[in-house]
Image: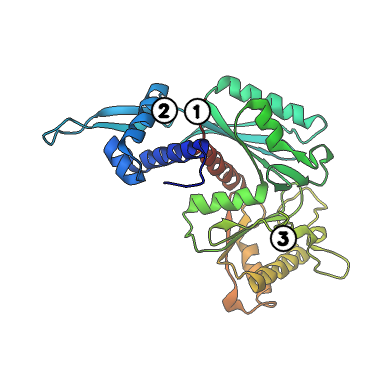
Amino acid sequence: MSDLFATPKSMKKLILRGIRSTLLDLGSATKLELSHALDISFPTISKFLTQMEKDGEIISVGFDASSGGRKAKRYRYNPEHMLGLAIFLEKTETNYAIFNCVGEIKKLGKAPSVLVDDGLNLLIKCIENIMTSYPKISSVAIGVPGSVDSGRIFHIPGYMQFQNFDLKGYYEDYFSLPVVVENDMNAAVLGFHHHKGIKENQSLVYLYSGQNGPGAGIMINGDVVRGSTFFSGEVSYIPQYNDRNFGQVLEKKSGSRMIAADDEIDAISRLIASFVAIINPHTIIFCNDEVEKKVLEKITKVSSQYIPSEHLPELTVSEWKQDYLFGLQSLGIDLMMNRISK
């Protein structure tokens, strides 16, 4: 745990994260067990645990049986001490989840869309209303249908009020809470990876057209690929035909979101061939309200016309909204694990 260049604040954050994570992983531990597990001195662990118990962050669960000396006090983490808010913005509505430090959902809810004029203030009011009912919220994870660089939204077609806006910085200052802002598809592939227990060395591509045009979340060896300018996954722009790119092919002319037309299947198959040739992923995930099993079979067949079939990845479907929230939730929990209490 030692770091010659660490500041006192960063060391405190590191120690708190270690204690929290270890207690959550083990279920309970004594000071000595934590000291050994984290390679931190017993007096330092004692100091931190005393304050954490005083704050209600950890709870004593009794004493271990004596081995001849003083009985060791055993502690467990209080998962209700901090709550997280995951909130994602869509064209027609705003969805959110409130969860504790072990990922248990306390509430799922919806609110009107904030992707409108004065959306920044509407989102503030929405979050304030939620925090009034859940004052223990200690982190906010926001998902947006656009490209994000360190919390700043720099590419969000159709929503100019959010263009080039530092959403993270603005809301961290306003709420005095840690905030993370993530692209919708990056969050979805992260959530699928965590929730499905995918092996770290697998590569995934999550495709979804949704309400704002096609996008992809790409994960290689357990890491989300964001690219040199954080533009990775904007597959709408991929040119596929003389007069149309991928986004133009999938542009819906009717109210249906289901993919069924031959030109859509061909465009997706070409995109799959491109992904196979470039990163050779293990799995490509589609949203279950856009692609049916029979369509997956057609996509597999057409894809094999563009790329040798033995190199095709597994094609599967999942529930995008759930994966999206799981991804934001994991980001929110990470913020809570690093939080320094005031």
Q: Can residue 98 be seen in the rendering of this structure?
A: yes
Alpha carbons under labels 1 and 2: distance apart: 10 Å
User: Residue reaching furthest left?
Assistant: 68
User: Is tag 2's residue or tag 3's residue first in the polypeptide sequence?
Assistant: 2
Q: Which of marks 1 and 3 is in front?
A: 1
Of helix, strand and loop, which one carries label 2?
A: loop
Tell me the tag on residue 341: 1
Q: Under tag 1, what secondary structure?
A: loop
> In the image, residue 334 lies at what x, y percent?
52, 41
Residue 176: give x, y in percent of width and height.
62, 27
What's the residue type where badge 1 is placed?
Answer: Ser
Q: Identify the residue shown where x is 63% and y is 79%.
A: 308
Work out whether 164 lies above or below 241: above
Q: Position of residue 110 (x, y in %)?
A: 64, 32
Can you tell which mark lies on residue 288?
none
Label 2: few (<14), some or many (≥20) within 10 Å? Answer: some
Question: Mark 3 belongs to which amino acid?
Answer: Ala
Q: Are marks 1 and 2 in contact (CB under 8 Å)?
A: yes
Seen in the picture, residue 312 relative to 317 is either above or below; the reply is: below
Q: Can residue 102 be seen in this view?
A: no
Disc 2, disc 3: CB below 8 Å?
no
Q: What residue is rendered at 53% in x and 58% in y? A: 222
Number of the label disc, if any, that sits on residue 57:
2
Category of crowding for the residue at label 3, using alpha-carbon neighbours closer than 10 angstroms: few (below 14), some (14–19), many (at least 20): some
Quadrant hosting residue 178: top right
Q: Which residue does the numbered mark 3 point to in the structure image?
A: 260
- Element marked by disc 3: loop
